[in-house]
Image (cartoon, rainbow, N blue to C red):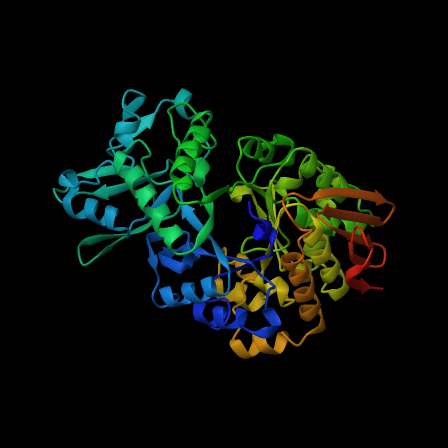
């Protein structure tokens, strides 16, 4: 990775500020944001999509009402590269491939682009009166389900036949004027050559947009075999990733597989050990825990592990999803994790359990600012710690602007709308007003520091030390040394960047 690849990365939907990607490009062109970001993770409503705010992709062409090629050109001219999503497991029922299947049925060239349930389970169960195979118990006893019942969508072919296709995630079916209508996310058949043609075409398109990092969403569901869990199947999952990586390498793309798993399972380590970038889903909870218990010991241990094991991460505080809790299991004691959840709920957060299961905590939905008790000193220290952690820092736009929990947005979204608590769209005037806030200006100063000083390099020696409520993180590279000395007892910290040979101070920042 290049020297500036460790610069800060903005994270937002294309309509998070002002309503269009062009408005975010205009924001990044402002003098106040000059050099603050070297990358931008644009969430997938950038594409044509119809559900899940972008994660149900119709096709990977730009959504003209939210983003245009000229907007991407403006970002490129600012020296900002992109992180973009590629959903390996599924596509929308409105995708051209599925629509062709609905129109032509057995004659469609995309007949095997999706997974015919009965063909998949042939010989592994009994045909039911509903027209689908019920797999024998031994074939599905280990299977991981995302919703009640078998993951099937009954597809009506033009000849009137009902054919079951694999549908892991959302579906909605209704009749309108005698015609069947669908919404949903249909699983792709990775055994089909046409799917691999589609994969390569998509990666080429994303690279043409200016992407350097590709976040692989739902990749762990894509490999499927009778009798297996059909989530993180081994070795098929790694074989899939390796084949995708070979395609990505043709276009200079770094893959970032996205998966939540407990620390104790060690999935993050396996992903990193196979040469992939991985998410640091541990940092958000560890920082809040450090404030609550007034100790940086767990943060120091985690930083040391990243360095010792050469794990390259993309880290964050908040994001479009919740604050991870499941991931912390095995890293923090269970009672400490529960205490953390209770604290965040007391500050207005909402617990999301794992796929609807009770007492299986997954994440807490809240803005990071509200999770910190809406304390600007804590937010600024959190940002400082993030800037000194190994990896590439990703910055959720609402964290940058000290966003508070948006309960009105949750109510508007209705049932299961808890994620909207941290997705407030800001108007351009609101953004400009918040740019005047001290906590925003100081965060931007820290972001510029991370992006502009050569010490924050992939070649740097990074070390960590904790004692009581204090934490020190140090980077050393070339002729520079950068030191963060933080105290979680009073949310105080000092940052100093020096020339190593002359001891000249090149940058100072302090919060007393």
Q: Residue at x 77, y 48 (%)?
A: 473
Say if 16 sits above or below 150 in the image: below
Name the image quarter holding the C terminus.
bottom right
**Residue 35 image position (x, y, % from top left):** 60, 64
Horizontal relation, residue 250 to residue 505: left or right: left
Classify residue 487 as left or right of residue 191.
Answer: right
Q: Which residue is located at x 24 percent, y 46 percent?
A: 97
Number of dots carrying numbers: 0
Question: Quadrant of residue 45 in the image?
Answer: bottom left
Furthest residue in direction front, as rendered:
502
Give coordinates of residue 374: x percent, y percent: 71, 65
Give the quarter of the image for residue 302: top right
x then y, percent, for residue 437: 68, 74
Q: Residue pushed farthest right?
A: 468
Q: Quadrant of the N terminus?
A: top right
The one of 313 and 102 positioned closer to us in this rendering: 313
Q: Quadrant of residue 229?
A: top left
Residue 475 makes an appearance in the image: yes
Nearest the camera: 326 or 59? 59
Between 67 and 154, the one nearer to me in the picture? 67
């Amino acid at each position: 990775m290049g020297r500036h690849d460790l610069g800060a990365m903005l994270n937002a939907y294309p309509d998070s500020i002002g309503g269009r990607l062009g408005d975010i490009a205009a924001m990044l062109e402002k003098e106040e944001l000059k050099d603050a970001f070297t990358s931008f993770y644009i969430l997938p409503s950038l594409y044509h999509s119809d559900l899940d705010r972008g994660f149900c992709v119709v096709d990977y062409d730009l959504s003209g009402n939210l983003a245009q090629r000229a907007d991407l050109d403006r970002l490129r001219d600012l020296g900002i590269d992109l992180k973009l999503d590629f959903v390996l497991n599924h596509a929308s029922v409105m995708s051209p491939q599925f629509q062709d299947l609905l129109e032509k049925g057995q004659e469609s060239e995309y007949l095997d682009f999706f997974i015919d349930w009965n063909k998949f389970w042939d010989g592994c169960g009994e045909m039911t009166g509903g027209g689908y195979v019920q797999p024998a118990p031994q074939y599905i006893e280990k299977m991981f389900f995302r919703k009640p019942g078998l993951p099937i969508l009954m597809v009506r072919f033009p000849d009137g036949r009902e054919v079951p296709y694999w549908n892991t995630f959302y579906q909605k079916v209704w009749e309108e004027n005698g015609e069947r209508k669908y919404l949903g996310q249909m699983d792709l058949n990775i055994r089909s050559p046409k799917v691999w043609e589609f994969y390569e075409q998509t990666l080429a398109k994303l690279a043409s947009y200016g992407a350097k990092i590709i976040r692989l969403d739902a990749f762990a569901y894509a490999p499927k075999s009778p009798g297996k869990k059909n989530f993180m199947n081994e070795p098929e999952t790694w074989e899939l990733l390796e084949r995708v990586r070979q395609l990505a390498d043709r276009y200079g793309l770094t893959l970032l597989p996205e998966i939540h798993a407990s620390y104790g399972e060690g999935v993050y380590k396996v992903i990193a050990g196979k040469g992939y970038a991985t998410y640091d889903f541990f940092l958000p909870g560890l920082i809040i825990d450090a404030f609550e218990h007034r100790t940086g010991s767990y943060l120091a241990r985690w930083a040391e592990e990243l360095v010792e094991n050469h794990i390259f991460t993309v880290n964050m505080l908040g994001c479009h999803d919740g604050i991870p809790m499941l991931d912390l299991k095995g890293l923090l004691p269970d009672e400490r994790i529960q205490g953390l959840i209770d604290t965040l709920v007391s500050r207005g957060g909402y617990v999301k359990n794992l796929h609807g299961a009770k007492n299986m905590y997954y994440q807490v939905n809240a803005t990071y600012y509200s999770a910190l008790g809406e304390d600007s000193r804590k937010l600024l220290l959190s940002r400082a710690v993030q800037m000194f952690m190994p990896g590439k820092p990703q910055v959720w736009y609402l964290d940058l602007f000290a966003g508070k929990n948006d309960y009105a947005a949750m109510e508007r979204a209705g049932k299961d709308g808890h994620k909207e608590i941290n997705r407030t769209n800001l108007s351009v005037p609101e953004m400009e007003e918040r740019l005047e806030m001290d906590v925003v200006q100081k965060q931007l100063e820290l972001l510029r520091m991370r992006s502009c000083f050569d010490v924050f390099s992939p070649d740097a020696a990074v070390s960590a030390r904790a004692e009581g409520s204090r934490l020190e993180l140090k980077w050393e590279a070339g002729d520079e040394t950068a030191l963060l000395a933080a105290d979680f007892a009073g949310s105080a910290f000092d940052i100093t960047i020096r020339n190593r040979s002359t001891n000249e101070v090149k940058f100072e920042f302090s919060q007393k």
